[in-house]
Amino acid sequence: MLTCPNCQSKDIGKIGINQYYCWNCFIELSLSKGIIHTHQVEEDGSLSSLDDLFDEEERLYGM
């Protein structure tokens, strides 16, 4: 099960292929090659990466 690296919530909804949304802290997550990529949704609908806020170990999925 996918866990949000930001808030540790498991309240994650699927919004697309390998794309998810955390309903607890309102960030978008995507999976690529076993790594969770985190994004903040901006007011204009664009995404800003939050990956630099987390160590790569925190973003590993399925380990």
Image (cartoon, rainbow, N blue to C red):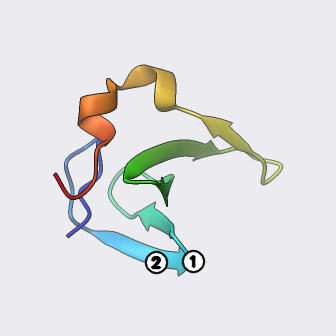
| Side (left or right) of 10 relative to 29 | left
Q: Is residue 34 above or below residue 17?
A: above
For mark 1, does the 10 Å Cα neighbourhood hold few (<14), some (14 to 19), or many (20 or more) residues? few
Considering the image in quadrants, where does the N terminus appear?
A: bottom left
Q: Residue 45's spot in the image, x, y percent?
A: 78, 54
* Label disc, if present, on residue 53 of the rendered structure: none
What residue is pinned by disc 2?
14
Three-letter amino acid code of the residue under disc 1: Ile
For mark 2, does the 10 Å Cα neighbourhood hold few (<14), some (14 to 19), or many (20 or more) residues? few
Q: Nearer the viewer, residue 55 or 3?
A: 55
Q: Is residue 52 above or below residue 11?
A: above
What residue is pinned by disc 1?
17
Q: Residue 5's spot in the image, x, y percent?
A: 29, 42
Q: Nearer the viewer, residue 45 or 15?
A: 15
Three-letter amino acid code of the residue under disc 2: Lys
Which residue is at 57% across, 77% downward? Answer: 17
| Side (left or right) of 36 relative to 60 | right
Secondary structure state at the residue bearing disc 1: loop
Which residue is at 58% across, 42% downward? Answer: 40
Choose mark 1 or mark 2, whichever is in front: 1
Q: Is residue 18 above or below residue 42?
A: below
Residue extending furthest front? Answer: 33
